[in-house]
Image: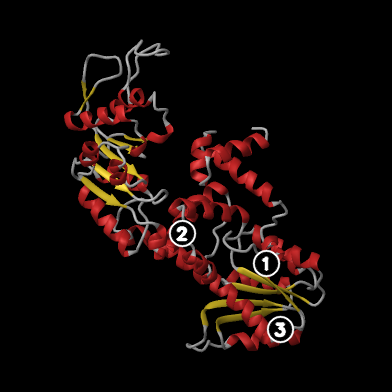
Amino acid sequence: MDETPTADPAAPWREFSVLIVDDEPGMLSFLLRALRSRCGAVDGAGSVEEARPLLQRSHYDLIILDIALPGLSGIDWLHELRNEGYAGDVVLMTAYADLDTAIDALRAGAADFLLKPFSLAVVLNAIQRCFERSRLARENFVLRREVSTRSADVEGVIGQSEAMLKVCDRLKRIAPTPATVLLTGESGTGKEVAARALHRMSPRADGPFVPVNCAAIAAELIESELFGHVKGAYTGAAQSREGLFYYARGGTLFLDEISELPPAAQAKLLRVLEERRIRPVGSEQEVAVDVRVIAASNRDLKAEVAAQRFRQDLYYRLQVLEVTLPPLRDRPEDIPPLVAHFMSLLTPTLGVPPLPLDPRTLARMTDYDWPGNVRELRNLVERSLILGWFDIGPEPDIGIRATVGNDETLEAVEKRHILAVLAACDGNKSETARRLGISRKTMDRKCQAWGI
């Protein structure tokens, strides 16, 4: 076996190493000569038995492996490599191929499949794709390590765009104060994430953070939920109950979708904000509460005031400090760190490896308007991790599908995905629908069709 000379410092892949395994001396020599001037280190072997000690002594970013080898076949060794934890790319080669062989190779974990004889351009293109994925994986790892710093050290708020850095700076200035905060922005822009960040950075961080979705509570129950009630206050009130304001004492109460509060509850909330005292439904006594209120709305509250659907005095009382979360379409540079964040969050739960974000997929993502904003992007990442490819734009061909062994129909994959999210939400269909970015009616229709 020839010694590998030092690669040209200007070589395109000098940081990568390659192991070539082929029992044909002519093909092995051809590949060694072609790659030694381009890569940092290149070794060759004529069989799996010869290759094993090389792999034990050195790390290889890529293995180019013939299928028909003396002794153990390339596909069988690839299965062993994956079971042993080898994470590098493997390109399989063969002169005798049919569709079943190609699919078996990809299911075994091959990154690419080359049919002999092939030109130098074909093999170099395959290697380029592998090394590009490797570079992206390294960059994603670094991104995950740096993302909190690039987000101005606001835990949970992900972004490196100028717009998000300004949001983070404003949140850091606001957090230490006791003032009421109004968070505005389109649905899915991360208002609850910002509210939690405000709480964690405030002197109330050791106290409770109590989120309330005002739209999810029936109008006739909202006052009881917020302020509590005494026994007999209304039909069915068999015992007294303390409200969410009481539970949030010493901490933060987050009122999401504040525009959905009915008029009577708006009047009571205004009084609580001014006097810091609550009166449970049916009670004659008031209770002092030390609570910071953060409200959020995806509607234009000024327009709601003009339409007489929201109290003007409550609007100005809430708007002591206002922070607007920008839509994702206005900050496309935040997409890569967000994708990296969601993959690091979801891969342990789903039990799947992360996906590389290649330039073509990133271009499609940045060209998309993201009407569901960050929530929609998170759903895309979760769905894509389950499917094994970034599910945006046209579906990939069967070869790419085979890399994850996906023989299910899209309907079956959708059902599995929805049921997994439903289980994660402890069977709460409303929360499941919110996370998936679908209506509750659609959720109910699908569950009924599946007999749930």
Residue identifier under label 3: 28
Depicted 261 relative to depicted 388: above or below: above
Q: Secondary structure at mark 2?
A: helix
Give the CA separation, mark 3 to mark 1.
19 Å
Taking the view exactly as shown, the residue that stands out farthest to the front is 307
Compute the Cα span from label 2 to label 3. Answer: 38 Å
* Nearest the eye: 93 or 338: 338
Look at mark 2 in the image and give the residue it sits on: 340
> Where residue 243 sits: x, y (%)?
32, 24
Residue 402 place in picture, x, y as percent = 70, 61
| Colouring chosen for the image of the structure | secondary structure
Report the amino acid beneath label 3.
Leu
Instruction: Using the rendered image of the protein, determine whether residue 59 is visible from the camera's viewpoint.
Output: yes
Residue 332 percent coordinates (x, y): 41, 64
Give the mark, 2 or 3, whose residue is nearer the N terminus. 3
Q: Nearer the viewer, mark 2 or mark 1?
A: 2
